[in-house]
Amino acid sequence: MSNKGEFELIREFFTRPATDASVHMGVGDDAALIAVPAAHELVVTTDTLVAGRHFPEDACAFDIGWKALAVNLSDLAAMGAQARWLTLALTLPASDEDFLREFARGFFALADQENVSLVGGDTTRGPLSITVTAMGVVPAGAALLRSGARIGDDVYVSGTPGDAGLGLRLVLGQWHDELSDAARDFALQRLQRPQPRLALGAQLRGVASACLDVSDGLAQDLGHLLQASHVGAELMLELLPRSAALAETDAAFADILALTSGDDYELLFTAPASARERVAAQDTLCTRIGTVTAAPGLVFFRDGRAIAMPQGGFLHF
Amino acid sequence: MSNKGEFELIREFFTRPATDASVHMGVGDDAALIAVPAAHELVVTTDTLVAGRHFPEDACAFDIGWKALAVNLSDLAAMGAQARWLTLALTLPASDEDFLREFARGFFALADQENVSLVGGDTTRGPLSITVTAMGVVPAGAALLRSGARIGDDVYVSGTPGDAGLGLRLVLGQWHDELSDAARDFALQRLQRPQPRLALGAQLRGVASACLDVSDGLAQDLGHLLQASHVGAELMLELLPRSAALAETDAAFADILALTSGDDYELLFTAPASARERVAAQDTLCTRIGTVTAAPGLVFFRDGRAIAMPQGGFLHF
């Protein structure tokens, strides 16, 4: 317990001047009042992070704040939405000024980067957990859904999946092989401060036929997309993009990480072959890794030969 | 752990056919897609209930589901909003089919009563807590704020405050005096299944000058309203409405309960004297209990004589 009251701390760290004209009432009344632009749909998602499950009990507060927001913004990115407004429900075991300050710093570092406004929240006493509800907008009818993949479409993934999985093994002390300091830092950064692919998601409107974000592992999440679209896919493992960090690890293990580890928050999407130039023109690295097929299910190939399905992705809950 | 997988249980109890045409995409994609009606503002609030803090660890799951929603809808009611859409973040220590079924029954009993749609959610493993984000709409510019009270306005409260406080004392085993079975049942019902005053809130648009909901105790919450409006008030204790249940208790103690106990979820509002007929015409009991004054602060009177301020309201966190 600090010298300051808890209400005062919350106010100090989480109340900021409203700068977004769409926010007619932010924190401070019974609810927020927001003007949603005409001809747009409201996009809403909510995700909870629980200490000991989604991050270590002793994780750095800045990273917890960043990530609690990032996982939600990633869902908006996967819809092709522009992120706009947030609510934050923070449950804390005790009033801890240092924790609150650093948590708020991490949370607002990402909120400011993406120009999203905190419009409401609730702080309660209890075991540490954070629930963020993120709201955004998308031009009506333009959202990227999971269900639009068509036979013959290309399958793409953004960035370099598997890095966060390597980072998690480092954090858990489950990594005993050689790894350069640069690779270690990169993998930890990817795990602890994921960058939601908002700019890419918005650019994929009218380009991608289906999209979701990779939170549970590429193979499992691709399965969700294929199921929603009533199609299958062939994935060419030799096409999987690999970061310099992941390239330091055993190649077979790198594939497993890329396919099954969670927390990447990259976008996984499909697009017709006619869109290849537009996909290649994105600012974010997007790699074609497979093809949508009529036969349901996911088949893996390496250098033209079908191989056995690796183990399933990371299952939350 | 039951025979069914946890994902399956969540799907079984929480996925329901979309019946609201404004929900273009509900549960099942990365985020929900919602059409907000033109010429309306979006109203957003979020509240967390934590086991052992907001309800007893052994509380009935139906009541937990009901109340987690009710406290959020009460915030929308206080804004004069129509409740429309919900997200639910549920953190559970273990998969418990009976708990999930009863929680969902309670949650949807109120959601159906108020015609609000669950559009998204997240289920995680951890200490029991529930965060609901409730969204509604209000005609642009018509929301009831805390800041509109004017000198000379009447102060009103809906229903009969203090009942939930009596219920809490019963639940905690802190009530040892005589009480009829009917009074006991009524007080418990008021604590465990509060009715958000949505219909009243909507009717008060254009009538009330300021409004909030009583969650922390009438005296403390009235203080918030007065502070936001930069005014004070005189409260006439002999005017406080009293339920038959509360009337069975000692009169002085009943006043304390009515003024300081939380969890009532009644509306506390101000309105000009010219609106008395319109307030009296409400379907919900609304009782005039005081007057807004220029002098800041809250002064209590009983039968024309100023009396000392009772202790503060219930402080969350």
Image (tube, coloured by chain):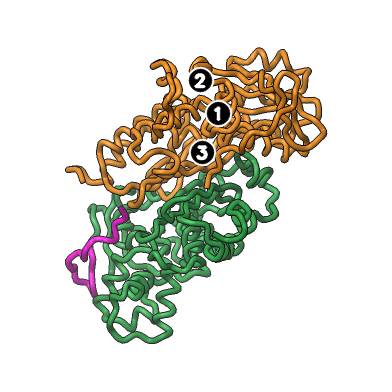
Chain colours: A green, B orange
As helix, strand or loop, the secondary structure at mark 3 comes to strand
- Magenta part of the protein: which range? A299-317
x then y, percent, for residue B10: 31, 42
Same chain for labels 1 and 2? Say yes or no. Answer: yes
Same chain for labels 1 and 3? Say yes or no. Answer: yes
Would residue A302 be counted in the magenta stretch? yes
- Identify the residue position indicated by label 2 in the image: B249
Q: Main secondary structure of the magenta part?
A: loop
Chain under disc 2: B
Looking at the image, tell me whether mark 1 or mark 3 is earlier in sequence order.
Answer: 3
Q: Which mark is residue B134?
A: 3
x then y, percent, for residue B317: 52, 48
Chain under disc 3: B
Q: Amino acid at mark 3?
A: Ala
Position of residue B161 in the picture relative to residue A54 (left or right): right
x then y, percent, for residue A40: 58, 44
Residue at (68, 19) in percent of width and height? B288
Residue at (65, 18) in percent of width and height? B287
